[in-house]
Amino acid sequence: MTLKIALPKGSLQEATFGLFKKAGWDFRVSSRSYHPSCDDSDIETTLLRAQEIARYVEAGVLDMGITGYDNIRECEADVHEVCELHYSKATTKPYRWVLAAPKDSGIRGPKDLEGKRVATELVNVTKRYFEQHGVKCKVEFSWGATEVKVPELVDAIVEGTETGSTLKAHGLEILDTLLVSTTRIIANKSAWEDPWKRQKIENIAMLLQAALTADGLVGLKMNIPCDKLDNILAQLPSLQNPTISPLTSKEWVAAEIIIEEKSARELIPMLKRAGASGIVEYPLNKVIY
């Protein structure tokens, strides 16, 4: 039996491959291939545009996929959402779809767009948004570079952004947020009812989340004199209580903790001055609570 999964092709592709590798799966793909090889023989992989993945998972052509919540909402796919994965091509911030217009346009909200034109790549979500506000306007599909179309071609846009910097650079003001989107693991509902496929999907989800949790964390281990243990432990940050182990010398113990990587530059010199020795910092691939 195999699990057929879809991974996003394009801007998220390398970030997704990197996350899977950290979680334990190695994908290899040639420049023209849409079917990466995987070192897990139970997995068959297809690369698709993120916008298409949800509908193929819904149809059962694929068992599992990774795509944005915005794409699920856009095609109203009836799929099982397994979990969120907080990562993107640039930052860990969620992707927002926002209504934006030129600062000097006089447009301050959806009501000001009655009878006007709005461009977006997220047509269905945008149409439902204006319907909810009782506004009749022309919503047209944009093939990209949407921010350059105002004000000459359209009056406003609905565009996806992580930081808002591109919109600001084009003199646009964010007026409202239509949708906050994060990356999701989704499953076909029939596949989710299959015991083998469900366990395989759950295993993948668990380890991908563990890899994301480990991002920005490091392990730290050291030897501590027993007479200085309480003083040093009082200064140690940790996700949980430090692990303390005896050494062959009764005058020393070994301690191990998990810390934020950025805090290590301050903490390690402090530990050394406090009497710790044999301090080792090491990377983490996965952290599971």
Image: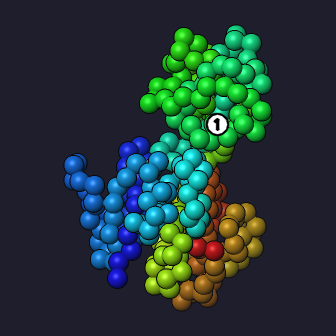
Question: Which image quadrant is residue 82 in?
Answer: bottom right
Can you see residue 233? yes
Question: Which image quadrant is residue 35 in?
Answer: bottom left
Q: Residue at x 63, y 36 (%)?
A: 126
| Residue that numbered label 1 is attached to | 127
Is 12 rendered above or below residue 247? above
Color encoding of the figure:
rainbow
* 10 Å crowding of disc 1: few (<14), some (14-19), many (20+): some
Apparent side of residue 11 relative to residue 248 in the rendered image (left or right): left
Can you see residue 211? no
Q: Residue at x 60, y 87 (%)?
A: 246
Is 158 rendered above or below residue 10? above
Apparent side of residue 209 relative to residue 53 in the rendered image (left or right): right
Residue type of the residue flagged with mark 1: Lys
Q: Position of residue 155 (x, y in %)?
A: 62, 17
Q: Position of residue 264 (x, y in %)?
A: 58, 55
Quadrant in which the C terminus is drawn: bottom right
Quadrant in which the N terminus is drawn: bottom left
Is 208 rendered above or below residue 49? below
Report the front residue among 121 and 15.
Answer: 121
Is 86 rendered above or below residue 284? above
Report the front residue among 164 and 22.
Answer: 164
Apparent side of residue 165 relative to residue 36 in the rendered image (left or right): right
Q: Position of residue 91 (x, y in %)?
A: 54, 44
Q: Position of residue 127 (x, y in %)?
A: 64, 36
Q: Secondary structure at mark 1?
A: helix
